[in-house]
Amino acid sequence: MSDRDRREEQNRGKAVRREGPERKRQRRISDRDRERYRKRRRKGRRRKKTGPGIGTIVFFSFQAVIVVALIACAFVFYNRFGIRILELYHEAEKKVEASDESVFCQSQTTEVYDDEGTVINTLKGDKDVYYLKSEDIPDDVKQAFVSIEDKRFYEHRGYDLKAIFRAVVSLVRKQSITQGGSTITQQLSRNIFLSHTVRWERKVEEIFIAMQLEKKYDKDQILEYYINNIYYANGYYGIEAASRGYFGKSVSELSLSQIAFLCAIPNSPSRYDPRVSPGETIKRRDRILEEMLEDGAISETDYASAKAETITLTETRTVEASNYMQSYATNCAVRALMEKQGFTFRYEFQSDAEREAYDEEYGQVYEECQNLLVTGGYRVYTSLNEEKQVLLQQAVDETLEDFVNRGTDGMYAMQGAAVCIDNETGKVVSIVGGRSQEDVTTSLNRAYQSSRQPGSTMKPLAVYTPALEGNYTADTVINDHKFEGGPENAGGVYYGNVTLRQAVEKSLNTVAWQVFEDIGVETGLMRLYELEFAKIMDADHQLSTALGGLTKGATPVEMASGYAALACEGVFRSPTCIVKITDASGNSVVDNTQTDTRQVYTSDAAHAMTNILEGVMKSGTGKALSLSGMPCAGKTGTTNDNKDGWFVGYTSYYTTAVWVGCDQVRSLNGLSGSSYPGTIWKQYMEAIHSGLYAKELND
């Protein structure tokens, strides 16, 4: 120890010795106080650890509730969807594992038969004929689809995580998947492997199949399969078939603009059909070019040149006029497959916007099932009768043969369409969508594709039969007179007090208007929804509907099926010509031998209406059209300025609806329901009833 340290130690000792007893006592008390303070602090800390405050309790309780809720949701999700999802995953594995390249290029032929078992049409895709290998597909085609459909195609593993998350949320909330954009691989999955159901399972399996496809095939193969299998409208499957169909040459010979034009179609073949809506197709072509420019796939010069290029299509590939039964059979078969796969057809909507959303979904599913029909190798058995078809076509052609003026498209300006339904089965037996014309072909079947104003033929369906279900009878008296805001009678003639029977026989507009107002517009419209009139709009919720003043109108098929319900004691059956559909091996796919029925009108009201319509044929506007020796009922219809003429009538055996008018709506001298439409109806119905027992209506 140094001298300095020794001196400091001595000084401390002296200081201690100098402390008195009192000072020592105070120091001891101070030491005890400090020790007690330390103990209290330690004890306080222990209390905080074992006894948290209310805020801490609430916080941890909230967290516990969340954890429990998540566990419960997971449990519920698994019980409701989990097992099925696992099954779908394994199904996807098996489907892809069993596939090879032939799956993506094969196309089986579907055959359509008439009621005698004779083949009336064959449906076959072109993809096995025009299939292109990846190296033969122009790079611009590949880049166009990647740019517009799936920019991350070369990066992802077949699915989009964000889209899947949206789909899962939709599944939990609505038990259906209405969201979730599909990658190119998912679209391929849907087109090749899936049954096109509209349930949530399809979306889930679509994702699983896409994942498996990405494991088994490389990106170039997947893109090759996709481009060769998507639908380009008008019966074209695959880019090469579309190129030859729309431009008359191979895709390798197309310009950038033509390629982008074709690549615009598959996103929505109905909306971007270049034969129907070329303007919409051009808009999407321009968008594709913009995306390609943004992705650096084309230059500014290429973009400007392609956008400025005029697109000219080759002549239309169409269905011949003599094949109206074929086009209708195809339409009915597609709808039957849609229903089989779970699609729900709707006719009543809360708003036009809701209708537009439905129409978009309908178009998508229709196209998918059309693809399925064309390439699936089905056997479609129909109720269509070749002999009756010839007779109906003959009646239309002969009645209108003097009208030879043509429109700009070369078609006869004056046209007609007609449909006949067998009342026993409820199925269509003949359907004519226009006049025969050897030098011009058309794909338009007016009998089910064209909606026109039905005029007074609407009155029994929307006004009088619903009224007969209430307080009205055939003898109820209504005052026929001109009143402010109301319609006019044909010829401006008014009869004062008339019975309901007389009002129908004379087709008095003012009476129909008053009765419709009395029973309520909604009452009448509800019957039209139940009769599956597909074009009832918001604007049709008005009194003019009583006179057939519909915004979009009605088709001959709709009018025939509506009157067939009157002939069948108020029982309605959805119009179709499909009896059954089987696969190539004969296994049942669709069985319509027992058609679903719906009681739209009471049998008493239907009987009363039929009795009144018999009077129309005996002493009313249809008295010149009665059938010889066969009881019949019917109604004429003529729209304002003689633009559309209708006759719809029935016997115990058949119901037939006939429309006559011009595609480009215009007034026609001499056109009324009892003129050309009535003549067609009478000629055809006389022919098909020849030799049949004269059976009374309402027997």
Image (cartoon, helix red, strand yellow):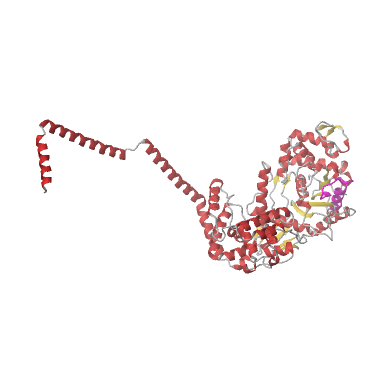
Q: Position of residue 588 (x, y in %)?
A: 65, 59
Q: Position of residue 669 (x, y in %)?
A: 89, 46
For residue 393, what is the image quadrant?
A: bottom right
For residue 103, what is the image quadrant?
A: bottom right
Asked if residue 312 is positioned above or below residue 456 in the image, the reply reads below
Q: Nearer the viewer, residue 483 or 559?
A: 483
From which residue to which does the magenta span run?
A: 659-686
Q: Nearer the viewer, residue 196 or 474?
A: 196
Q: Nearer the viewer, residue 612 or 251?
A: 251
Residue 684 within the segment the image draws in magenta: yes
Residue 439 within the segment the image draws in magenta: no
The residue under the point 56% across, 46% down is 174
Q: Is residue 231 visible?
A: no
Q: Nearer the viewer, residue 119 or 141?
A: 141
Q: How many circles with numbers are drawn on the protein?
A: 0
Q: Is residue 76 left or right of residue 674?
A: left
Q: Is residue 53 visible?
A: yes
Q: Is residue 367 left or right of residue 509?
A: left
Q: Position of residue 590 (x, y in %)?
A: 66, 56
For residue 307, what is the image quadrant?
A: bottom right
Q: Position of residue 37 (x, y in %)?
A: 23, 35
The residue under the point 10% across, 32% down is 20
Asked if residue 433 is positioned above or below residue 250 in the image, the reply reads above
Asked if residue 626 is positioned above or below residue 333 in the image, the reply reads above
Quick one: which residue is furthest to the front in this view?
A: 3
The quarter of the rendered structure image containing the C terminus is top right
The residue under the point 61% across, 58% down is 147
